[in-house]
């Protein structure tokens, strides 16, 4: 009973506290327009803050993975301090931008605080609990990491209505006040997670990690496999971001404008559910890479059906086309989430537990690059293909480009196919999970 309690108190609960805090980075769309209006810049200019946050999440994970490997207490404390300080600093520069409208200093300050400082907190906070979870839940490590990463995905669904309520109730300057309040709240949550997080008392790091077994040396044992994992992880994220970033407008295109809010919440549930469900399912498979093959094939089929039927450009009529487009959004969100939760366990199956945090961190560099390419790729396609048409609803006139959104699918289909080929031909089958366990 004591061991069961320790699993939750020392691993699962602190992991959720950390991931449910840093996962709110995905709430950016809730307040990005308000920030732009308040500081006197275009929404496009402020959007780079989010891209920088994802970029530095991946890069800080890649470069600080060794710190996480050596001392999760230090890394989780760094995460709490940087994430909270980044939020507080973002609030300060939003306030400054309100006082000095159009100030480039305010914009750069937001880039630094939300992008760089928070990005360091994101990367170290994301990595810190993962290895600990796999050590505590050795037999169901996919379920355990899936639970934490699902917390990262569910954070948006949980925090979005709270943030919106704060913006509505805090009055003038509510946007920067919200950041200051949340900085305090999330610091407390992450600091509690930092205090609770601990590896099992009987776990001792392999002696080989002390000398001559850096993460890069371990990767060199199976370089082609690592390249395959990196490629399919990167392409899955890129495709996911390309579609998810256009999700609201696609829903409007198929005639469900009144259900945008509800369907956005439903897709968020699929995103979080994919993180937990696919990783738990992978625990039952002989080769964890099989789950990637399943996710990618489902994405290819769903994308292909909407391309063949021209479901988006036809406005979702007849109703079956609307259903196919919704299935595509649900499948992409689930596969996007599942791709994150299965990476650390797939890596541990192939490379063992030695230096797994550092190896995982290097792999997350794919997330960093995808954060700069996914959204921008789809935005470029929508801007240069098709034509924008005015769409009036509820007294508001939106500009939508059904042909542009449909064109995005041709690119994502090709990328999904490349990712599937990497999964099938570059990631070697790991016949026995016990082999990787013994290597540790």
Image: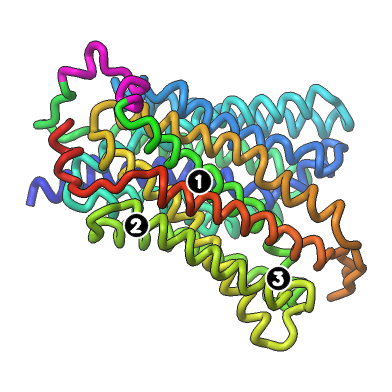
Say what secondary structure mark 3 lies in. helix
Asked whether 18 or 362 is in front, the reply is: 362
Q: For residue 126, which quarter of the picture? A: top left
Which residue carries the number 1 mark?
A: 23
Say what secondary structure mark 2 lies in. helix
Q: Is residue 266 left or right of residue 394?
A: left
Asked whether 296 or 74 is in front, the reply is: 296
First along the sequence among labels 2 and 3:
3
Tell me if label 2 and label 1 are in contact, CB under 8 Å: no
Residue 107 picture location, percent across and down = 78, 29
Dot in front, 2 or 1: 2
For the residues labelled 2 and 1, the Cα–Cα distance comes to: 27 Å
Q: Is residue 417 left or right of residue 430?
A: right
Which residue carries the number 3 mark?
A: 251
Question: Which quarter of the rendered picture does the C terminus lie within?
Answer: top left
Q: Which residues are magenta?
A: 207-220
Residue 378 picture location, percent across and down = 73, 51
Asked whether 46 or 316 is in front, the reply is: 316
Residue at the outermost top position: 211
Q: Would you call the spot at circle 3 few (<14 residues within 10 Å), some (14-19), or many (20 or more)?
A: many
For the residues labelled 1 and 3, the Cα–Cα distance comes to: 24 Å
Tell me if label 2 and label 3 are in contact, CB under 8 Å: no
Q: Is residue 183 above or below residue 166?
A: above
Q: For residue 403, which quarter of the picture? A: bottom right
First along the sequence among labels 1 and 3:
1
Residue 338 picture location, percent across and down = 43, 55
Dot in front, 2 or 3: 2
Give the total number of marks visible in the rendering: 3
Return the mark for residue 290.
Answer: 2
Q: Is residue 156 visible?
A: yes
């Amino acid at each position: 009973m004591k061991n069961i309690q320790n699993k939750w108190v020392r691993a699962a609960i602190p992991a959720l506290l950390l991931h449910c805090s840093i996962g709110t980075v995905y709430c950016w769309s809730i307040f990005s327009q308000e920030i732009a209006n308040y500081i006197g810049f275009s929404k496009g200019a402020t959007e780079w803050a989010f891209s920088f946050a994802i970029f530095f999440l991946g890069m800080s994970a890649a470069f600080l993975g060794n710190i996480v490997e050596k001392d999760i207490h230090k890394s989780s404390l760094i995460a709490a301090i940087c994430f909270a300080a980044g939020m507080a600093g973002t609030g300060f520069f939003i306030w400054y931008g309100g006082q000095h409208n159009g100030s480039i200093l305010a914009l750069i300050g937001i880039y630094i605080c939300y992008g760089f400082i928070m990005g360091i907190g994101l990367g170290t906070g994301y990595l810190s609990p993962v290895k600990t979870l796999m050590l505590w839940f050795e037999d169901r490590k996919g379920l355990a990491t899936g639970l934490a990463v699902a917390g990262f995905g569910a954070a948006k669904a949980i925090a979005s209505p709270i943030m919106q309520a704060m913006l509505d109730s805090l009055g003038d300057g509510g946007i920067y006040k919200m950041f200051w309040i949340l900085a305090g709240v999330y610091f407390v949550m992450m600091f509690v997670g930092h205090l609770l997080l601990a590896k099992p008392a009987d776990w001792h790091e392999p002696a080989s990690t002390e000398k001559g077994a850096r993460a890069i040396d371990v990767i060199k044992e199976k370089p082609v496999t690592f390249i395959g994992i990196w490629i399919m992880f990167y392409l899955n994220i890129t495709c996911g971001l390309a579609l998810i970033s256009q999700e609201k407008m696609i829903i409007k295109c198929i005639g469900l404008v009144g259900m945008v809010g509800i369907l956005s919440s439903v897709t968020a549930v699929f995103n979080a559910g994919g993180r937990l469900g696919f990783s738990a399912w992978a625990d039952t498979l002989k080769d964890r890479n099989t789950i990637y093959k399943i996710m990618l094939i489902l994405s290819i089929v769903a994308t292909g059906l909407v391309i063949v039927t021209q479901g988006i450009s036809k406005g979702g009529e007849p109703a079956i086309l609307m259903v196919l487009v919704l299935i595509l959004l649900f499948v992409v969100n689930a596969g996007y989430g599942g791709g994150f939760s299965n990476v650390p366990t797939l890596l541990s199956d192939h490379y063992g537990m030695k230096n797994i945090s550092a190896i995982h961190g290097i792999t997350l560099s794919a997330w960093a690059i995808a954060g700069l390419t996914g959204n921008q790729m789809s935005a470029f396609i929508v801007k240069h293909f098709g034509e924008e048409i005015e769409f009036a609803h509820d007294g508001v006139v939106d500009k939508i480009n059904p042909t542009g959104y449909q064109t995005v699918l041709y690119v994502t289909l090709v990328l999904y196919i490349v990712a599937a080929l990497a999964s099938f031909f570059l990631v070697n089958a790991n016949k026995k999970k016990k082999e990787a366990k013994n290597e540790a």
